[in-house]
Image (spheres, rainbow, N blue to C red):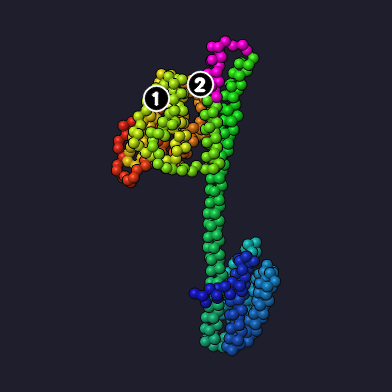
Amino acid sequence: MRFKSTLYNFWIKLAGPPTKFPLNARIFHSVCLISLAALSYNVPFNYFIGLPKVALISLVVLLIITALYYASRIRNQYGISILITNMVGLILFVINYFLNSGLRGPTDLFFLLLLLLSIGISPANQYKIWIPINILVVVTLNAIEYFYPETVPYTYVDRYSAFIDHMSAYVVVSILAYICTDYIRRSYENEKKSALEKSHFIAEKNQQILKQNVELERINGEKNKLMSIVAHDVRAPLASIQNFLELLTDYELDEAEKKDIKKELLDATNDTMALLSKLLNWSKSQINGVSAQKQRLNLDELLNTTLALERSSATRKNINLDYKIDPAIAIFADRDMMQVVFRNLIGNAIKFTPEGGQVSIESQLSGTDCIIAVRDNGIGISAERQAVIFSLNVQSTYGTKNEKGVGLGLLLTQEFVAAQDGKIWFESAPSDGTTFFVAIPRASKSTSTTEPDQLQFGTSDRL
């Protein structure tokens, strides 16, 4: 194998590297090398079988081919070398036809070989010229011999000499024809392989570019959404606060009016604080990435902390908070993330529930998970919003008392739940309320693999 590889590399060096020479030039060099080897044998052979003139012509051809090979391979003048080869080849084979028995000799084989070489080594704009010239020359020579047979003498001394000359000519022609066609076939396969590799490479690059474009569009959309929130949703409540403060400063108001304005100020401030908190949490998750610091947490204590913050909002709207959590349940989660999740879900339930409504929080163990359900009997979610509710494409909405929503809360909730190996999904119908389900791994000393219990508060396809 090593010897074969060394021989192949040596041949490539003699024929010329593909990076430096075109295919037709490399075929020409290979033909020259084989011809030189054949002529080196043919010169003494023809001399010893009694054909000194043919031997002399073969010697002249050998010298010419040597010069042409040198000019093409060493001097890089392969264009003129190929042209001269076609011209000289025709002239020499015409002479050889008359000196080597015409139709009874092997010269027709050499003309056929020259025709094949002309197709293989000539530039595309030349070989179509050499084909009819070659055919015309051969037909003319054969016609001359047919009508004037005395012009082409029989030059073999015996049948053995004719046999050897024909066989050696056939072998040389066969070898050169093989080299020419093999070069073309291998070059075609290599070019085909290279084209396929380039095609696959281009396809992969296009796919990468497409993915990058999609990602850039997503990032650009998030940036535009964030800028819209900052420009409009933050400015609006601050403008309201400014207007209320101007009223308190510039006008004499009675105590009832002052009380109403103070209440509106407090509501606007609370909404702004909630909005800024969501913006801060979301921006932080986008910049630093979402990384959960999970630990064993008591679900009852965790929810009580959140409910303490949301209870005042429920009281202002006269909403009943129904709380059904098993105090023995422990989950394996990130404390800060879970508080953000619960604040968003419970806050949304209160926001979109009318006065006098009800929001319930329930828990249920299911296999290795704890399922927390936040249910309300509010206005529900439209089918259009359900499709994009966990993305930045969702539009800002107002609660039942015009509480401003920005669409970031549920996106942040989904990211935080996923970071803790949990799942979130929901059930909703317009005017019929909404239930959000959060599945979080439970903290347990045993690694239970029991089948999930049937959830009493309903099931749904998970997002």
Q: Position of residue 389 (x, y in %)?
A: 47, 32
Is 406 situated left or right of 70 in this image?
Answer: left
Q: Nearer the viewer, residue 402 or 78?
A: 402
Q: Where's residue 271, x and y in %?
A: 53, 26
- Three-letter residue code for mark 2: Asn
Question: Mark 2 = which residue?
Answer: 402
Which stretch appears magenta?
251-269
Please say whether residue 193 is visible from this viewpoint. Answer: yes
Please tell me which residue is depicted at 52% across the width and 34% down the height of the picture.
392
Question: Which SS type dominates the magenta stretch?
Answer: helix
Given residues 262 and 416, the one toward you in this image is: 262
| SS of the residue under disc 1 | strand
- Which residue is at 66% across, 74% downward? 69
Numbered disc total: 2
Can you tell which quarter of the image residue 180 is in? bottom right
Q: Of 327 and 202, which appears nearest the observer?
A: 327
Task: Tell me the distance, in whole angstroms, between the alpha carbons under discs 2 and 1.
Answer: 20 Å
* Residue at figure coordinates x 59%, y 24% from the top left: 238
Q: Which type of secondary structure does the marked residue at label 2 adopt?
A: loop
Q: Are marks 2 and 1 in contact (CB under 8 Å)?
A: no
Look at the image and tell me whether residue 97 can be seen.
no
Local crowd size for mark 1, using a 10 Å CA cut-off: few (<14), some (14–19), many (≥20): some
Percent position of residue 57, x then y = 65, 81
Of 312 and 404, the residue lying toward us: 312
Task: Name the front one of labels 2 and 1.
Answer: 1
- Check residue 188 for magenta coloring: no
Q: Which residue is mark 1?
A: 321
Whether residue 267 is in magenta: the answer is yes
Q: Earlier in the sequence, mark 2 or mark 1?
A: 1
Image: 12 above or below 192: below
> Badge 2 local density, few (<14 within 10 Å), some, or many (20+)?
few
Q: For residue 98, which quarter of the picture?
A: bottom right
